[in-house]
Structure formats: structure tokens, C-alpha cells
Image: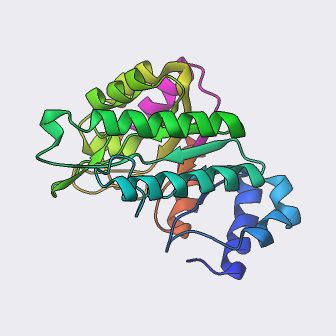
Amino acid sequence: MIDNKTFFKQLGVAEKLCGRVQLVLDQPYGYHNLDALRTSPIKKNLEFTIHGPFLYADCLSFDVEYRKASIKQIFETILTTKKLDCDQLVLHLGRIIDVIKPTKKYLPVLKQSLDELGDFAKQEGVSILIENLPPSKRALISYPSSFEELKEVSSLNKNFDFCLDVGHAALCNIDSTKLLRFFGKKLKNVHIHDANGVKDHLPIGQGDIDFVLLKKNLDKMKYSNGIDIEILDFEKTIEGFNQLTSIGY
């Protein structure tokens, strides 16, 4: 959890560089002194995207009470998003047990969660952006992490927009160009970080992603929504910002 002094210092840097910030609302990560943020003058000079909880929130859980608790936690995050005068919430849907995935038995649970979240978010004037997730070699598999799973989400409920995470797509061997065509006008946010086939959230240039091609494809579709750099080091994030702006971002 980031402290107040560091948080507002970083906001000041973001204000000068690009005027936008992605705020993670999850425990134990992220920033949680939201009253201080709401009353800070710097808030007026920044555009925020909110990233919802993901460590302990699972919309695909077969445990009824756990799923209900997860939905409640996301409802609370939707309300917080609204209180911060934001209208977009990026969301990880959850995880599937590996032996369940081929059976598709998770689809009724997923549809119920999507319907509940979609109705509540619409009521509160917040758009939920479903993010494509990285693969997992463990028993719990992140969802959605494949192109087919993203199509499943879209077919079950049309009320959601999308966030393209280019590093996650690279780890899953999904062509980002294909995802851009699929998302179309429903693409509302892009997460940028490098990936090398084994690891993601790397500094720009330390992986295999062609960011020049990505920019050309975004321009081709006339993309004008938010782009957030997700490098897990503040100084490397600044370096990445400068690298990306030098090639036209």
C-alpha cells in the first residue's frame, strides 16, 4: 500500500507528463486514502481510470457465498469509481479450475455475475471494461485469457466494453491486431507493458512487443481513448512514457 507522500508526488509527475492515472483499488495493493484524493486540488487536473479488485474477487467461483462477496466488493468499487467522478472501471473477471474449463459448466455462473454487474454499473453510470488476462499454469486459470473466452463474455452480455492488455495478449500468443478488430468501438482502454513470452509487465524494450505496429493499428481504427502504462516500477514507467511518446503515442 502506497503512502500519501509518495502517492501525491507521483500524481504530480503524472500531471506534468500526461494528465492521466490508473488507480488500483485492491487490497493490499493500491491507494486507499480516497478522502484525501477526493479533496485534493490535483484531482481536477488528472483523468483517472479505476482498476477494480482482483486478488480476492472472483466472479466465476462455484462457492455461492464467495461469489456473492466478490460481486459485493465490485459493487462497492463501482460506487467508489462514481464518487471519484470516474466513469470507467477495468475488471478482471476471475479464475476457472482447470478440470472445469473444458466442460463449460462455469458459463451459468459467469452469466449471472455479468448480468448482476452490468445492471448495477448501468444504474450507477459506470462502464465496466473487461480485461484480457494472462495464462496460468496452475490449477486456477485466469479468465478470460483466450480469444474464444473473450467471445464468450461478449455473447453472454453485450453491456460490457473492453480493455486490451497487450502484454497479457502476448503471453497468450494472441495477435493484438486480431483483438483490436474484435473489440472495435468497444475498446475503451489499453494497458501497455512489454512481454517476452515468459514474463510480462516488463519495461518497454525488454520484451518482444512491436509498439510501432501497435500504434499504427490503433491509429488505423482511430482509437482515441485511454492508454495506461503498467510497468511495475515508477522510474521505468517514466522512461517507458518517454519511449512511447518518441514513436508517436
Asked which quadrant contains residue 180, the reply is: top left
User: Is 212 within the magenta?
Assistant: yes
Tell me, yes or no, if residue 249 can be seen here: no
Is 191 left or right of 201, judged from the image as shown? right
Query: Vertical placement of 132 versus 161: above or below?
Result: below
Q: Quick one: which residue is furthest to the front in this view?
A: 65
Q: How is the image coloured?
A: rainbow
Query: Vertical placement of 6 versus 190: above or below?
Result: below
What percent of the width, then of the height, locates residue 241? 58, 52
Q: Residue at x 56, y 68 (%)?
A: 30
Tell me, yes or no, if residue 6 can be seen here: yes
Query: Vertical placement of 225 versus 82: above or below?
Result: above
Asked which quadrant contains residue 108, the reply is: top left
**Which of 22/76 is in front?**
76
Q: Residue at x 85, y 67 (%)?
A: 40
The quarter of the image holding the N terminus is: bottom right
**How many numbered dots are placed on residues in this image?**
0
Query: Vertical placement of 150 versus 191: above or below?
Result: above
What percent of the width, then of the height, locates residue 249? 59, 38
User: Is 164 within the magenta?
Assistant: no
What percent of the width, then of the height, locates residue 189? 56, 38
Tell me which segment is drawn in magenta. Answer: 210-227
Asked which quadrant contains residue 122, the reply is: top right
What percent of the width, then of the height, locates residue 129? 53, 38
Q: Residue at x 35, y 23 (%)?
A: 178
Is 55 left or right of 6, judged from the image as shown? left
Is 89 left or right of 95, judged from the image as shown? right
